[in-house]
Amino acid sequence: MSRWLLLLALATLPGCGQRQSALHPAADHAATLMSLFQLMLWVCGIAYLLVILFLGWSLVRRRAVAETGETGVRAMLGIWIGLILFGLVILAVGSFLADRTLGAASQKALRVRVTGHQWWWRIEYEAGRGRWIETANELHLPMGLPVTLELRAADVIHSFWVPNLAGKMDMIPGRINSMTVTPGKTGWFRGQCAEFCGTQHANMALVAKVERPGEFTRWLAHQAEPVAGEAAGRAIVEKGSCAVCHQIRGTGAQGRVGPDLTHLASRRTIAAGAAPLTRGSLRGWIIQPQAIKPGTSMPPSDLSPQDADAVARYLEALR
C-alpha cells in the first residue's frame, strides 16, 4: 500500500513546477484566469460544504426533520434556492468581468504572429513599415508591455498554451484568433500545443522568455540582422536541399517551408524542444530527422558525414 502511495505522490510532482503551471501566473492574462478560478473554487467549495453539512445534519436529525412538516421543507427549499441563485450571480459577474478584462486589447500593443505547423512554431515580430522579423519555437516578450498574439495554423488545428502567461486558444486553419498579454515577471516559461495535431503532438513544445524592455529591444534588433557564417558550411547549405526549405537572411537560402535558421544558435533547442541545440544534435537532425522526431516533414539528408558535420558547425555559429 505504501508503495502505491509513493508512486501516486511522485506522479503529482510534475504539477508542482513553475515553468509550466497555471497556478503561478506571470502575465495579466493568466492572472485574470487564476482569479476567476479562485472565485469559482471558493463559491463551489462553500456550496459543496453546505450540502455535506446539511445532509449530515438531516441524517442525524431525520426524525426532527420529518416533524417539521411541509412548511419547514418549503422554508429550507427557499433558503437553498436563494443560496444557489446568489452563488450563480457571483459566478456570472466574475466571469463577465474576466471576459471583459481579457478582451480589452491595447491599441499600442506589439503584434506578434504565431503560426502552428506540424510540429513546430513559426514566430514573426512586427518591426514597422510592413516589415516582420521571423524566428521559430522561442517566443520573446517584453515585461510590462502589452503584446497581441495573432494565432494561426498552417495545416491542422493546433492550440497555443503557455500556462504561466495565458489560457489556451485554438489555432484554426483559415482563421486568426488573437489575445493580448502583458507579462509581469521575467524568466523562461514552457508552453505546449494543447490540441492533438498528429503523431508528434506531444513533442510540439514552445519556450517563452520574458525579459526587460531594453533587453527585448536589443534582442529583436539582433534578430533583424543578416548573418554570413563559416564559408564551407554556408556553401553546402546554399547549394543543397537546405536552401529549398529554410531561410538564412544574408545568404542564398530563402526557403519558407521550414523554420527560419538565421539566428538558430541563439535558441536553446531544435525541432520544437525535441533535442538540445548541440553540434551532435544538429548533425543527427540533418542526417536522419526521423530518428529524433518520427513523422516530421523534414526528409533525411543525402549529405556525406563530412558535409553534414560542416553544416552542423556552420549552423552552430549562427548566433
Image (cartoon, grey):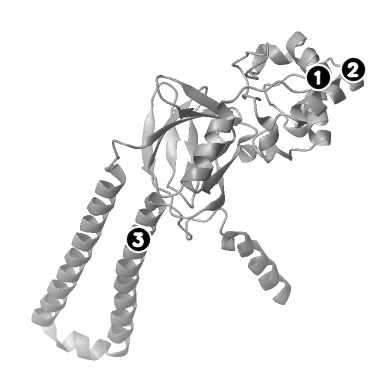
How many numbered callouts? 3
The tag on residue 304 is 2
What residue is shown at x 49% (from left), y 44% (from top)? 214
What residue is shown at x 55% (from left), y 44% (from top)? 208
Which residue appears farthest toward the left when viewing the image?
71
Q: Residues within 10 Å of mark 2 (few under 14, many from 20)?
A: few
Quarter location, residue 111:
top left
- On the image, the x and y values in percent for residue 107 come to 28, 36
Between marks 2 and 1, how big is the CA–CA gap? 13 Å
The residue that mark 1 highlights is 233
Between marks 1 and 3, how big is the CA–CA gap? 52 Å
What residue is shown at x 35% (from left), y 37% (from top)? 109
Quarter location, residue 303:
top right
Looking at the rendered structure, the secondary structure element under dot 1 is helix
The residue that mark 3 highlights is 35
Circle 3 or circle 2, nearest the eye: 2
Mark earlier in primary sequence (2, 1): 1
Question: Dots 1 and 3: beta carbons under 8 Å?
Answer: no
Circle 1 or circle 3, nearest the eye: 1
